[in-house]
Image (spheres, grey):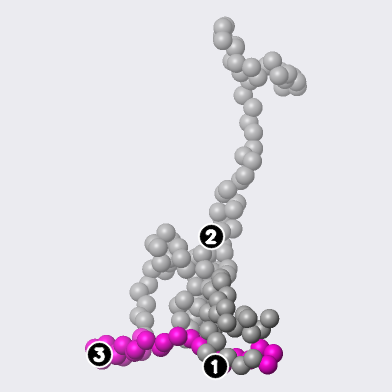
Amino acid sequence: AKNKKYTKEDFIAKKHGNEREPWVQKQMPFPTKKLKSKEEEHYNKFCDWMKPLFLQIPLTDAIKLPPYSKYMKDIVTNKRKIPNEEISTMLANYSFNGKVPKKLGDPGIPTIPCSIKNNYVRTALCDLGAGVSVMPFSLYKRLY
């Protein structure tokens, strides 16, 4: 029965009788074991890269490195552990004297002087990214 060719009927489950479906070994469509080992290899390379590194840039900038941002996130959220679980000391230079800075007053309306054709406007409202442009009707009448 080694060279037997199976048909569709051979694979249909038999409800009656002692016959069973032939057993066929299929390969997995997405082999994850190789991908996992490659992922681990990349992670170990990342850890080797990080060991001798002395960061003089903010952590937020270090996290933005595209290939390594995922690993940094996994380490911070405790989804991954650093292979050589060594405790490293962080050097921090900061100063806080306990005083809260003074609040500044309202800066007012964001206006600038502007000229359109021969018309001069002293207090034209700056566009700070608003979706709608605002223009007084009197200025509109002067322009057209």
Dots 3, 2 in contact, CB < 8 A: no
Q: Which residue is mark 2?
A: 40
What number of labels is visible? 3
Numbered mark located on residue 7 in the image: none
Q: Position of residue 29 (x, y in %)?
A: 64, 41
The amino acid type found where label 1 is placed reads Arg
- Could you tell me if residue 50 is visible in this image? no
Q: Which residue is mark 3?
A: 99
Per the image, label 2 sits on a secondary structure element best described as helix
Gap between marks 2 and 1 measured at Cα? 64 Å
Gap between marks 1 and 3 measured at Cα? 40 Å
The amino acid type found where label 3 is placed reads Lys
Numbered mark located on residue 122 in the image: 1
Q: Nearer the viewer, residue 143 or 28?
A: 143
Determine crowd level at label 2: few under 14, some 14-19, many 20+ residues with C-alpha closer than 10 A: few
Q: Is residue 106 left or right of residue 123?
A: left
Tell me: residue 75, above or below residue 125. above
Q: Nearer the viewer, residue 115 or 1?
A: 115
Determine crowd level at label 3: few under 14, some 14-19, many 20+ residues with C-alpha closer than 10 A: few
The quadrant the C terminus occupies is bottom right
